[in-house]
Image (spheres, rainbow, N blue to C red):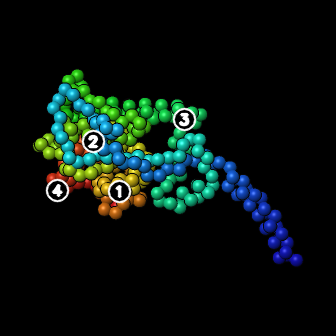
Amino acid sequence: MPAPTRTRVLAVCAAPVVALIAVAALVPLPFVIAQPGSTTANVLGLHKDKPVITISGVATRGTSGQLRMTTIEATGPDTEIGLGDVVDSWFRTDRAVMPRDAVYPAGQSDQEIEQHNVAEMKKSQDAAAEAALRYLHRSPKDVKVELSLADVGGPSAGLLFTLGIIDKIDGDGRGGDLTGGRSIAGTGTITPDGTVGAVGGVSLKTQAAGRDGATVFLVPKDECSDAGAELPKGMRLIPVTTLTDAVTSLKALKDGGSVPSCPA
């Protein structure tokens, strides 16, 4: 009789587990699912028929390269995420499952979250303009910078905005493009003193950049490991911690010099 007894015990124990799984499959879970977003916003070009960067008070130059800001697309705070969605995303390299509270502040409405993201972008743009003018030893009293990309929220385009301003005013400092005519993507926050900060979601952003043709990606140094996790074939990662790092690396890349890379 021992074997049948064990069978009955296992059956009794399994029943609650099956019931829990069945309930979990129907109940929305507190997660957000993210995927690679758009990289179409070239900060050296136009967005909705308007220049992303407009500069007055100093002569500007034409540019031939691209500085593509990268984004991720995440499900909204009110989107119902089920167990099947989570399991499917866990097994995909182009998806990331994140706690909802890590992406969206708890207790805020969609409108409040949107307002927060727009405010973060505005702060990022202001910091980018200040960092660029400091780097170029220009006074904000004499040079005015207007950045127009309000419908993309968050601070992660700060580094790209700053490099775009520098390229439009000074290029590589010798009459050429800072980009060397390349399509360069990247991410990173910026502070007025030129410090580059981490952002998150970089493995999804490198995938987006590779999908859209970029072969060089500027990444905050502390996120090298994440950026290399699903790195597209042929893409070069350049780690940066400061604005000076980024400018120096782009000039070296253009000239065929030594350029730092993320550890393998």
State the SS at label 3: helix
Q: Are marks 3 and 2 in contact (CB under 8 Å)?
A: no
Is 198 above or below relative to 86?
above
**Residue 251 location, x and y as percent?**
19, 48
Q: Nearer the viewer, mark 2 or mark 1?
A: 2
Position of the C terminus by quadrant: bottom left
State the SS at label 4: loop
Q: Are marks 2 and 1 in contact (CB under 8 Å)?
A: no
Q: Given the image, on which type of amino acid does mark 1 rest?
A: Gly
Q: Label 3: which residue?
A: 110
Q: Given the image, on which type of amino acid does mark 2 rest?
A: Gly
Q: Quadrant of residue 214?
A: bottom left
User: Residue at the location (85% across, 75% down)?
Assistant: 4
User: Residue at the location (16% across, 44% down)?
Assistant: 172
Task: Estimate how packed mark 1 is, as few (under 14), some (14 to 19) or many (20 or more) residues with alpha carbons within 10 Å.
Answer: some
Q: Nearer the viewer, mark 3 or mark 4?
A: 3
- Please tell me which of labels 4 and 1 falls first in the chain: 1
Q: Label 4: which residue?
A: 256
User: Residue at the location (43% across, 33% down)?
Assistant: 118
CA–CA distance between discs 4 and 1?
22 Å
Q: Given the image, on which type of amino acid does mark 3 rest?
A: Asp
Q: Tell me, for residue 45, which label it has, or none.
A: 2
CA–CA distance between discs 3 and 4?
47 Å
Seen from the viewer's position, the closer of residues 110 and 21 is: 110
Q: Nearer the viewer, mark 4 or mark 1?
A: 1
**Residue 9 location, x and y as percent?**
82, 67
- Please tell me which of labels 3 and 4 falls first in the chain: 3
Position of the N terminus by quadrant: bottom right
- Please tell me which of labels 2 and 1 falls first in the chain: 2
**Residue 113 location, x and y as percent?**
51, 34
State the SS at label 1: helix
